[in-house]
Image: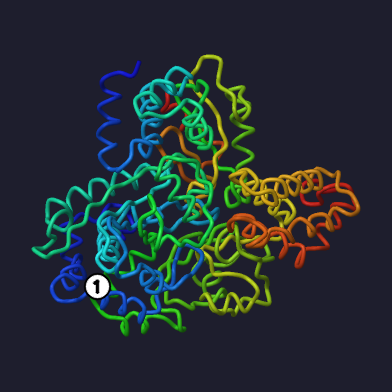
Amino acid sequence: MLTSEERAEIETESTHYPTREAVCIDALKIVQQHRGWISDEALGDIGELLGMSSADLDAVATFYNLIFRKPVGRHVIYVCDSVSCWILGCERHFQRLAERLGTKPGETTPDGRFTVLPIVCLGACDHAPALMIDRDLHLDVEPANLDRILEGYR
Amino acid sequence: MRPGGEVVDLRSYEQAGGYQGLRKALSGMQPERVIEEVKAANLRGRGGAGFPTGLKWSFVPKDAPHPRYVVCNADEMEPGTFKDRLLMERDPHQLIEGVTLAGYAAGCDVGYIFVRGEYHLSGERLREAIAEAHQAGYLGKNILRSDFSFEMHVHMSAGRYMCGEETGMLNALEGKRANPRSKPPFPGVSGLWGKPTVINNVETLCNVPHIVSHGAEWFRSLSRTKDGGTKLYGASGKVKRPGLWELPMGTTVRELLEEHAGGMREGLQFRGLLPGGASTDFLTEQHLDVPMDFTEVQKAGSRLGTGTMIVLDDQTCPVGMVGNLIHFFAQESCGWCTPCWSGLGWAERILKAMEEGHGRPGDLEKLAFQARFWTPGQTFCALAPGAAEPLQSALQYFRDDFERHINEQRCPWRTNG
């Protein structure tokens, strides 16, 4: 069941488009914002609201990098692994996170605090290496200041 | 844009001359006149393809049906590119005015700013600025008491490079997978929900208010070459001062690399660069005096693309760099057409094995063979043709480095001594 808050947010966005189908990506993101990820049940509920089959909606949900079809931690650490960050040594961040959190890319810490994911170019190449945690962009990241950055995310 | 990153609010934007372009257009310029001015200004698309903007707008037939749409391509995901994010975060009203003027010129009714999902701050600032613009009468019904009405919405994407392909973007806006569409029909005739649609990049549209305010001749005079205006140029990689600079179109590679970016970091030598993002061919030492405009960079065998340079130093492995780029393209392939999803995956595996010391004789021939299929017409869109550019030019300029990986069964950069 979608909550009334989720429904209201989806309906507000839907006024921007002439078709119900068009709001499905916004709808997936809205529900994910509330619940952390999109379960099969949530997918079915959104589909019902918009008049889309679960198959069609899942085709959309699985196409996009920022929509999660399995649970993630309270905070998602997106480490940019595109070319400029690679030149500036982003691999060290994956190593440091593996050491500190015990997570390889794609994994979640056992306490549910962090999920570590690679992400494509974040558009901060003059301040590489860059990473994003939840909605926050972090620039000029070095392994030394990575620990301090993580402390801000309980 | 303010160096500290603070946003230019509506009041400050107006004080600096903002929305004067819109005022001028709506108080006496016919839409066709706006198109002519932008054509005469020689404004070429700043999203990578460099298509003449005024010409693109003129493709919307005069008797085309309504509603018509403007879509601003703010899906900046080309690796090495970081200009549109700054334009949106710091000067959102400039973009809003540009989108509105494009709408006026092509007779459109609604504008969407399609922002990549990761650009949260850009989305927030654009939404706030749209609300401010509405309040002030620059958007909505009968703008500035004219007959022109225009609505604008921000659409935040959910993360996929293919959304930056204009027809992929239309599918994404319609709530679908961002596979490309065949052209013709072109979006100017049949685009969003089958209606006439004009699609332009953020930086392109940001130039429009200034062209309308000050005229095509002024815009052409800012440039050193035939392509009009200024350009946001950038540099990343191991240079002393990575950054972004607004400079006359046609500034040379050398000026950008040495004067503005400060040259290579201490102890490093320049080996080459991609002049305009991941999907452009390498330029090397011999090309340092090439002016960075569309025509000259093409003559040098590459593309201006986004104009943000990715610099390769002598202590970074070219094979690793190309491997990283091909990994990106392979991952982001939408999977629609075989040469792309199959060929890029194959190339990625070959390059990874080579980097790990398992390269085999014949690998370079296999890579060249695959890349021959990554051309428009063989592939459905320009993603794979873009991937071909750094790969083919690296095989041209750094072939010895590839061969060393195969012959020595190791990466000479990663395994010293």
Q: Say whether residue A25 is left or right of residue B179.
A: left
- Judge by depth and name the residue closer to the eye, B350 or A134: B350
Q: Which residue is painted at 58% across and 69% down in the image? A: B303
Q: Amino acid at mark 1?
A: Pro
At which x and y percent is residue B55?
A: 40, 74
Give the percent coordinates (x, y) of residue B95.
30, 59
Which residue is rendered at x = 52% and y = 62% of the image? Answer: B235
* Number of residues whose C-alpha sits closer than 10 Å to that of mark 1, classed few (under 14), some (14–19) or many (20 or more): some
Residue B124 horizontal side relative to residue B56, left or right: left
Residue at 39% from the left image edge and 48% from the top image edge: B115
Is there any visible trace of residue B267 in the rendered image? no
Which corner quadrant of the image does residue B382 belong to? bottom right
Q: Position of residue B243 (x, y in %)?
A: 47, 60
Residue lying furthest left:
B145
Question: Subunit of mark 1?
Answer: B
Residue A47 at least partly seen? yes
Q: Is residue B342 above or below residue B292?
A: above
> Which type of secondary structure does the marked residue at label 1 adopt?
helix
Q: Which residue is mark 1?
A: B31
Q: Quadrant of the N terminus of chain B?
A: bottom left
In x, y percent, where is residue B133? 18, 54
Figure quadrant of residue B103: bottom left
Q: Report whether B264 appears left or right of A38.
A: right
- The quarter holding residue B63 reads bottom left
Question: In the picture shown, does residue B315 fall above or below B287?
Answer: above
Residue B111's place in the image compared with A51, above or below, is below
